[in-house]
Image (cartoon, rainbow, N blue to C red):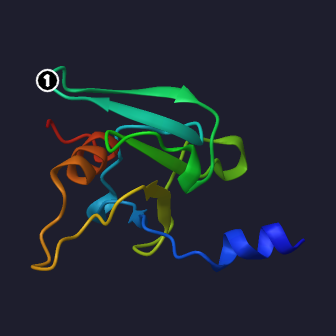
Amino acid sequence: MEDLNRKYAKPIKGSHLLLFFPPGGKKPRFDRLLPGLYEYVPGEKRVFFRREAMEYRDIQNKNQFVLVDGPPNIDGNDAASAGPLDRLCHIVFSYPVVDKEGSMSPRARVALEWIYGIDY
């Protein structure tokens, strides 16, 4: 128990983003995404699922992120938005996604654009 308490006492150096459904009834790229570890391949403009994961410590490099929960499966149907504040997914990064000036990391932007279906 003491070991677990020591681990939780250490500050986390990562960050997370909550993504919401696009406004105006636009659909995101995916109806369903598996939770787990994803990796962006620079130069190839692709993101792929690596394995099941759910924590900061599962991330091995800055081209990876963890999708903690993906688009909801509402009543067995594809993802759908019932309102402007419905959450699409939650992603975790091993680094701060915003710098001191408030600019988003290019790697984090790739993850957002991939999920929302914006060509990156």
Q: Is residue 76 left or right of residue 70?
A: right
What residue is shown at x 72% (from left), y 74% (from top)? 6
Q: Is residue 83 visible?
A: yes
User: Which of the pair 60/18 is nearer the observer?
Assistant: 60
Q: Quadrant of residue 43?
A: top left
Instruction: Out of 34 and 10, give the one closest to the viewer.
Output: 10
User: Whole-percent x and y of residue 39?
Assistant: 39, 33
Residue 70, visible in the rendered structure: no
Residue positioned 17% across, 72% down in the render: 99
Of the 4 image quadrants, the one containing the N terminus is bottom right
Closest to the observer, 16 or 71:
16
Indicate the amino acid at tag 1: Gly
Q: Residue furthest top?
A: 44
Residue that badge 1 annotates? 43
Helix, strand or loop for disc 1: loop
Q: Position of residue 26 (x, y in %)?
A: 30, 52
Q: Identify the image quadrant of residue 103.
A: bottom left
Give the residue at x 31% y 60%.
22
